[in-house]
Amino acid sequence: MEENKITLTDDFNIFNLIRNVWINRILFLAIIAAFGIGSIIYTLAVDHIYEVVSVIKPADPSEETTLNEASPIIGLSIGGYSHDPVINNILITIKSDTFLEQFYHKYKNSIELFDFKEKDYKDMDEKLKEEMMRHNALKKLHKVIDFQVNSDHNTITISVRLKDKYFAYDFLNDFLSTLKEYIVKQNTEEMEEDFKFYTELSQNSNDPIISQMLEKKVMEKMEKKYKLTSNVFRIVQKPAVPAKRIFPKRSFIVVLTTFIGSLFAIMIISLKPPFEKIIRMLRNSIN
């Protein structure tokens, strides 16, 4: 009975491990090869993702030129937001569903971006179908559009990740032009409201000194906001068609998977002798 005892300390020392790997080298290499080949097949079968990047710089980082003075500076340095109110105005616009909804209506039938499947909406009425399609489209836009803030240079890096690199390039160019037009429109509307507000205060004021101060104030704000309206941001780095995909990273995946396969093979070979002893003990006990 002594010879049938399972001594794990003998089976799991370095010498026995190396010896077992050498004895079972065919099994060891077969497991590694299976992992390696599987990783190569995966990188060939999975959809390739390309990233188009652009860098923009707000025209005027001065707090006096921001349109939404009362807007909260949400997130601060967390989640890509900045302490700069002009940059925050752009970032909040980028993440706004109201702004992104324009692209849903514009690219609704574009399979490169949304690729709606009828089977997902076949049991819905038209109203519910439209609501779900809008919800899924906005969710997809939030996923493919990303941004980062460089607070040292007051720049915003905007990226788009899609399967079709040429479509991603065209989409980012359209995104930047639409963003500028959207902010200019907002600025113009805000400027007109401010102008109307201060004009009414000035006209209703009986004190000529206060009226003069209000007129001076409104002219200063209108001048600064006009500068922001006419030049919201400039493109520091223009979008370009990417030469390489960002996913899958074939070399990294193959190397990592092969390494994991090696560890798995060592584990299997290390556990093989104890299991063989258990099987022999069971057979002897039966006999």
Image (cartoon, grey):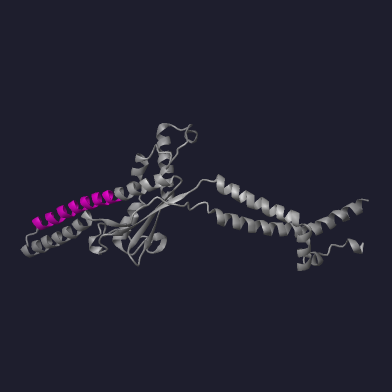
In the displayed structure, would residue 111 be above or below residue 272?
above
Q: Main secondary structure of the magenta part?
A: helix
Q: Position of residue 5 (x, y in %)?
A: 87, 62
Q: Which residues are magenta?
A: 179-204
Residue 137 lies in what quarter of the image? Answer: top left
Q: Position of residue 229 (x, y in %)?
A: 22, 54
For residue 254, side relative to residue 99 (left or right): right
Q: Nearer the viewer, residue 80 or 111?
A: 111
Q: Nearer the viewer, residue 74 or 88?
A: 88
How many numbered discs? 0
Picture residue at 84% right of the left edge, 62% below the top: 6
Q: Position of residue 266 (x, y in %)?
A: 72, 59
Picture residue at 80% right of the left edge, 67% below the top: 9
**Which residue sits furthest right?**
287
Residue 198 lies in what quarter of the image? Answer: bottom left
Residue 218 lies in what quarter of the image? Answer: bottom left
For residue 61, side relative to residue 101 (left or right): left
Q: Nearer the viewer, residue 255 or 243?
A: 243
Picture residue at 92% right of the left edge, 62% below the top: 1
